[in-house]
Image (tube, helix red, strand yellow):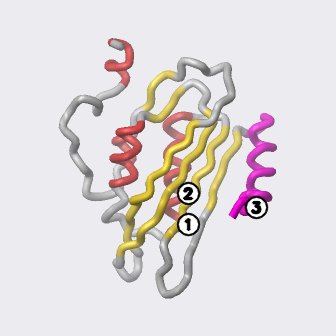
Amino acid sequence: MAELKDQLSLLGRNTEYKQDYAPDVLEAFDNKHPGNDYWVRFNCPEFTSLCPIAGQPDFAEIRIAYLPDVKMVESKSLKLYLFSFRNHGAFHEDCVNIIMKDLIQLMNPKYIEVTGIFTPRGGISIYPFANYGRPGTSYEEMARFRMMHHDLNG
């Protein structure tokens, strides 16, 4: 446990919610099973951001799924990071890609996908999907396959 406490600074402390986009709150810890392929899934049903033009709030469910390698994202830091978009102006597609890229930079996962299920505004729903598979590996092939088939389940 002491090793984990050295890697993580947010657990067990008072929570400070950032008022704008804050990738610096993300924390990672060592994966105890880096030789195994397994899914880690997160669901944030209360994601909010702002339209960069109108300043109106956008609401979404953000779904993150990844295959970890050496590092894993700590869930409280992920929650604070996602909440930091609350006052951030970005289009739906930007939010999904920014989240994915920040998590890639943090963890260097084997594979990751991020989906945004945004509530309708003006009668239109937008569901952006972004994914990444480590180049030169079977995970890159997996990313191509899942990109081509991502909407078959709904």
Indicate the amino acid at tag 3. Leu
Q: Are marks 1 and 3 in contact (CB under 8 Å)?
A: no
In the orientation shown, which residue stands out farthest toward the top?
2
Alpha carbons under labels 3 and 2: distance apart: 21 Å
Q: Secondary structure at mark 2?
A: helix
Q: Are marks 2 and 1 in contact (CB under 8 Å)?
A: yes
Q: What residue did someone put label 3 on? A: 152
User: Which segment did they paint magenta?
Assistant: 135-154
Q: Residues within 10 Å of mark 3 (few under 14, many from 20)?
A: few
Q: What residue did someone put label 2 on? A: 97
Q: Is residue 127 magenta?
A: no
Indicate the amino acid at tag 2. Asn
In the orientation shown, which residue stands out farthest toward the bottom?
122
- Give the residue at x 37% y 59%: 85
Q: Position of residue 47 (x, y in %)?
A: 41, 60
Q: Is residue 140 above or below residue 51?
A: above
Q: Residues within 10 Å of mark 2 (few under 14, many from 20)?
A: some
Alpha carbons under labels 2 and 1: distance apart: 6 Å
Q: What residue did someone put label 1 on? A: 93
Placement of the N terminus among the 4 image quadrants? top left
Q: Position of residue 74 (x, y in %)?
A: 42, 34
- Give the residue at x 38% y 19%: 4
Q: Is residue 144 above or below residue 48?
A: above
Q: Secondary structure at mark 3?
A: loop
**Viewer-proximal residue among 76 and 7:** 76
**Seen in the image, is 52 located left or right of residue 31?**
left
